[in-house]
Amino acid sequence: MRLYCLPYAGGSAERIYAGWQHRLAGLTRDRVEVVPVELPGRGSRMGESPVPLADALVAGVVQQILPWRETPFALFGHSLGAMLAAEVARVLQHRHGVPAAALMVSGAGAPGPGVSGPADWLLPDTEFRERVRGLAGTPPAVLENDDLMAMFLPVLRADFAVAGQLCGRGGRPISSPITVFGGDRDSEVPVARLGGWAAHSTADCVVRVLSGGHFFLDDLSEQVIAEVARRLRAAEAAPSAAGP
């Protein structure tokens, strides 16, 4: 099975999920290949322009997965990555007939019609930097370096714009089971919003609340990885996800 991992806003999937292959190996008997999905404008794709349009970004991820459509796969994403993973799973199943074995979303409330957030990607630079600082996911050394922020801000603005577009998305539910991870001290995503993901699947939806803030993925990675391994083993043992 392949596990496609999508990053949070401004993050590099290759960095965030760098240790997952090694740590999942023993928990899944080496039966899972971790595939960090790098987005434009960061990491190995630093030379590309960031993409501020949700449909274009989703299409790019889908095109990376389709050549491997015969291989069972699961999707994991945190924050922006969770919203992307959900929409990618929906497009793959309902447009291409390729359902995921499992969808795992982390640090994101359920999207849907009527759900909206602040248009923070439109803030002036000074206010936008303070908004990013408040998320506590960017090292202070980066926030205080004007040269680094000059490169970093366009990527963040594009990612925040995509998240804003995706948070209001609905659509047909998928057949994949969903696992939802949340932090009990996440001021961005209250625990009460996690259960809404159940409406996005015709299969089961399990919510796991961890002790942490919005970036519990980094702080509690061992707990997250252990639960991801359990869900992948369950997906492997279960009958194939419902067909197209």
Image (tube, rainbow, N blue to C red):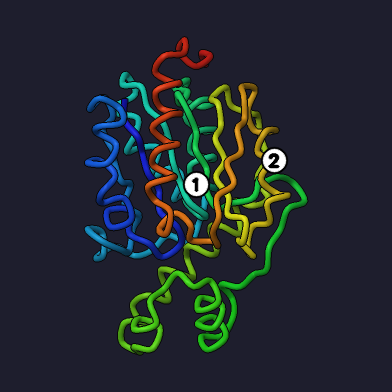
Q: What residue type is labelled 2?
A: Gly
Label 1 element class:
helix
Instruction: State the residue at coordinates (31%, 21%).
Output: 71
Q: Nearer the viewer, mark 2 or mark 1?
A: 2
Instruction: State the residue at coordinates (38%, 88%).
Output: 144
Residue at the top extreme? 239
Image quadrant in which you'd find residue 138: bottom left
Image quadrant in which you'd find residue 140: bottom left
Q: Which amino acid does label 1 sit on?
A: Leu
Judging by the rendered image, the residue that carries numbered circle 1 is 84
Apparent side of residue 7 relative to residue 136 in the rendered image (left or right)? left
Label 2 element class:
helix
User: How far separated are the C-alphas under marks 2 and 1?
Assistant: 18 Å
In the picture, the quarter occupied by the N terminus is top left
Residue 96 position, x and y percent, is 46, 24
Callouts 2 and 1 close, C-beta under 8 Å: no
Instruction: State the residue at coordinates (37%, 44%).
Output: 5
Image quadrant in which you'd find residue 100: top left
Depth check: give the residue in front, 121 or 134: 134
Residue 219 position, x and y percent, is 42, 59
Residue 26 position, x and y percent, is 25, 32
**Mark seen at residue 157:** none
Residue 23 position, x and y percent, is 27, 41
Number of numbered discs overlaid on the protein picture? 2
Depth check: give the residue in front, 39 or 183: 183
Residue at the right extreme? 114
Residue 14 vertical position relative to residue 174 in the rendered view, above or below: below
Instruction: State the residue at coordinates (45%, 57%).
Output: 8
Crowd band around label 2 with a 10 angstrom C-alpha radius: few (<14), some (14–19), many (20+):
some
Crowd band around label 1 with a 10 angstrom C-alpha radius: few (<14), some (14–19), many (20+):
many
**Mark seen at residue 195:** 2
